[in-house]
Structure formats: structure tokens, C-alpha cells
């Protein structure tokens, strides 16, 4: 780790671009020779462009702890499998935040996992507070809880003005995935 201060950055909001901004920061960190750990919550698709690219880069460890879209009913029995996957992701995140093996830790969709009640914020907040100096932590997802906004050094809220899907344009390779 460097002599610089620990940094926590948060990308949230209802618009496209949260993970995209985080992956741009990942590219920047790798350009400086940093070692990175990416932990994705909720997401389960391993064919998206960013994963296909970054998982093959030296210095990147990439793990997904999701099983895809959540049921609309929070009381659905299927939610237990989502909670289990997110809990495993949280354990991996806590390890990465404590480890000196990583200079850059990206917790993609962690805010969504928190907002959906899949994980508790308390262990994450403790790990963020104790992350060593020099570590860069990037958090993404809709509906960031106030407690995460409070501990972050930089918070960016993406606001949707217009999106192609509103005009019937489907998700496109290289743009949405």
C-alpha cells in the first residue's frame, strides 16, 4: 500500500453509468500497476464485456456473488438463495478490504444488495473504517443507504435524463453489456 489516505468512492443513482464509471477507475488503477479485487453482488452474467476484459488482466481477481434478477416479492422463498449468495459476497468483500494483497477493491452493486435487504451494512461499515491507508474502495448500486453516503469521500449520483430503452431500443453489446 502507498502512503496515501484510504479513499472510498460511491456511484449511485437511477441512471446508467455507475458500474461503467467504476470500471473506468479500475482501468486507471491497473494502469498504475495496482492490484485489484472485483466483487459483484446480484449480477450473474459472466459474458458481459467488462468481465471478459478485466478477468484476463494481470493483477485482477474477479468474483460474482449473485444469481441474477431478484423476485418481485421480497417474501418469496427464492430470496433465501439470493441472501446466501450476497452473504458469501460480503464475506469476500470483508476479506478483500482487510487484505494488503489489493490496492483497489470494487464492490459492484453492493448498494443494491444492501437496499434489497440481502446483507447488513454493519460488517461492511466496520471493514471500510478499518481498511488500510492507500486502499481505494469503489462502491456501486442504486439506492445507496445514507450510512454509506456518510462514510464515502466522494459520492456521485447518476440521474437519468433519457435512456434508449424508453424509445424501444434494446440493450446493445458494447453499450449495456
Image: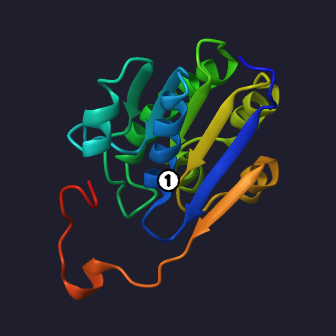
Which residue is nearer to you in this view: 71 or 112? 112
Residue at the (42%, 66%) spot, across then down: 16
Q: Residue furthest bottom?
A: 167
Residue 170 relative to residue 18: left or right: left
Residue 73 relative to residue 138: left or right: left
Q: For the N terminus, give its image quadrant.
A: top right
Q: Which residue is mark 1?
A: 21
In this figure, which colouring scheme has been used for the structure? rainbow
Q: Residue furthest front?
A: 32
Which residue is nearer to you in this view: 10 or 90? 10
- Residue 150, compared with residue 7, is above or below; it is below
- Residue 48, compared with residue 134, is above or below; it is below
Instruction: Estimate how packed mark 1 is, as few (under 14), some (14 to 19) or many (20 or more) residues with alpha carbons within 10 Å.
Output: some
- Residue 172, compared with residue 168, is above or below; it is above
Say how many tags the image has.
1
Which residue is nearer to you in this view: 32 or 125? 32
Residue at the (18%, 56%) spot, across then down: 173
* Callout 1 secondary element: helix
Task: Point out residue 110 in the picture as x, y percentages from the top left corner.
Answer: 55, 45
Residue at the (58%, 51%) spot, across then down: 111
Task: Point out residue 172 in the picture as x, y percentages from the top left corner.
Answer: 18, 63
Task: Point out residue 3 in the picture as x, y percentages from the top left corner.
Answer: 81, 21
Quadrant in the picture for residue 139:
top right
Which residue is nearer to you in this view: 26 or 163? 26
Residue at the (78%, 49%) spot, across then down: 153
Task: Point out residue 104 in the picture as x, y percentages from the top left corner.
Answer: 59, 29
Amino acid at each position: 500500500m502507498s502512503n496515501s489516505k484510504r479513499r472510498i468512492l460511491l456511484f449511485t443513482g437511477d441512471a446508467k453509468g455507475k458500474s461503467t464509471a467504476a470500471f473506468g477507475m479500475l482501468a486507471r488503477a491497473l494502469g498504475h500497476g495496482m492490484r485489484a479485487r472485483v466483487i459483484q453482488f446480484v449480477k450473474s452474467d459472466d459474458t458481459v464485456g467488462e468481465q471478459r476484459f478485466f478477468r484476463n488482466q494481470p493483477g485482477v481477481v474477479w468474483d460474482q456473488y449473485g444469481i441474477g434478477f431478484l423476485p418481485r416479492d421480497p417474501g418469496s422463498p427464492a430470496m433465501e438463495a439470493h441472501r446466501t449468495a450476497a452473504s458469501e459476497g460480503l464475506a469476500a468483500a470483508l476479506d478483500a478490504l482487510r487484505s494488503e494483497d489489493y490496492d483497489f477493491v470494487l464492490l459492484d452493486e453492493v448498494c443494491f444488495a444492501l437496499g434489497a435487504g440481502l446483507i447488513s451494512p454493519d460488517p461492511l461499515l466496520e471493514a471500510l473504517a478499518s481498511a488500510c491507508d492507500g486502499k481505494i474502495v469503489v462502491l456501486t448500486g442504486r439506492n445507496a443507504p445514507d450510512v454509506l453516503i456518510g462514510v464515502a469521500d466522494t459520492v456521485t449520483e447518476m440521474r437519468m435524463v433519457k435512456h434508449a430503452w424508453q424509445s424501444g431500443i434494446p440493450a446493445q453489446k458494447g453499450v449495456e453489456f
